[in-house]
Image (cartoon, rainbow, N blue to C red):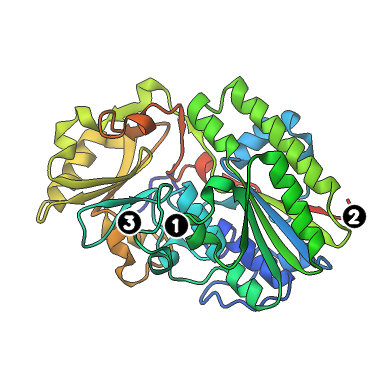
Amino acid sequence: MTLPPDLRAPAYGRDNLADVLPGVAAALGVPLDRGDLPADPLGLTSALAGARRVAVLLVDGLGADLLRAHAHLAPTLAGLGQPAGDLSAPCPSTTPVSLATFGTGLPPGSHGVLGFVTAVPGENRTLNHIQWADDPDPVSWQARPTVFQLAEQAGVATTAVGPYAYAGTGLTVAAYRGAAYTGVVGPGDLTAHMLHALRANPRALVYGYLAELDLTGHVRGVDSDSWRAQLALIDRVVEQLVAGLPDDAALLVTADHGMLDVPPASRTDLDDEPDLLEDVRLLAGEPRARYLHVVDGARQDVLDRWRDVLGDRAWVADRDEALATGIFGTVDGGLAARIGDVVALARGSWALVAGRAEPGPSRLAAYHGSLTATELAIPLLCARGSD
């Protein structure tokens, strides 16, 4: 089974978010074993040549298509160099998957953070990776070393700067362990702490994460004055970071996914479709990337019903069919059980909401998670200290 033409598999090891930190590590002289994946497919060793201090800013929700459409509101971002063109988010194109992919330099099938919400194999429950504290143990659930750990072992001072509330969470430990985490209270605080960490060490890797653009998009929509105003503020943050770079430093700006508005007419409420939830033991994932864990013996019946009811609103496959497309990369051992028995990825601007079971997420204005070009395309932008 192949993907429909409007969805595409992420190109791991070629132009993916997973390739950013390995390239930075290579530029800083950090040895890294990526198995079958090339060490630096983005050519960052060359693009960052001479830089002994590198900052990477990840702006949640800053899709490449959205940035191009609003370049006039973000002149600093629009004026930065592009060492490798657009990159691709992983699958699903959602924040916890992307952050673990970024931090480990590996596809989701290798690190095991495989969705916004996934089943905990062997237990009749799900794990929301954003609300994750310490159950399951983050080091066991995501057992692969991070690039931050490997950089620290090689003598590079590593710092992660992000919201104060995220310090010590399961996702932070899974994605950033090895880096000293600095919790901040806003974008200005983040800018100051990123620049301080760069200046404090002669050889440094500094990571920063901004959440506000994604949140604004979800709540107000990406075609809103609120989202556009937030983008302009993000551009000011980047302007300040570029202005404060030491001469031997570089800044990369990237994102975790794009996003798109979903009008009311493009929403299928699963709670109003009893045939779709029949024999579904656990409903996981999110509105544009659903995982269905079904009762024993019901996989084919559920698969057939979802295909029949949804038609071209979603690509629906069983787990083996989804794995065969390569959308998760190579999936290690027991990690496959975290993916649903049935996978449904939204097409077009559709979303598969659950108004009663998930009232908050079902009221959002914009979503991401699937494999359309707009959701997958993310920027990789670069500035040097001499700029």
Quadrant location, the N terminus:
bottom left
The residue type indicated by label 2 comes to Ser
| Marking on residue 127 | none
- Distance from the alpha carbon under mark 2 to that under mark 3: 46 Å
Q: Nearer the viewer, mark 2 or mark 1?
A: 1
Can residue 314 be seen in this snapshot?
yes
Pointer 2: residues within 10 angstroms few (<14), some, or many (20+)? few
Residue 149 in the image: x percent, y percent?
59, 71
The residue type indicated by label 1 comes to Gly
Residue 119 in the image: x percent, y percent?
28, 54
Please identify the residue farthest to the left as the structure is shown.
297
- Distance from the alpha carbon under mark 2 to that under mark 1: 38 Å
Q: Residue at x 77, y 67 (%)?
A: 46
The residue type indicated by label 3 comes to Ala
Where disc 3 sits, the SS reads helix
Left or right placement of residue 271 versus residue 376 in this view: left
Name the residue that disc number 3 marks.
Answer: 322
> Would you identify the image quadrant in which residue 217 lies?
top right
Name the residue that disc number 1 marks.
Answer: 170
> Would you identify the image quadrant in which residue 50 lies?
bottom right
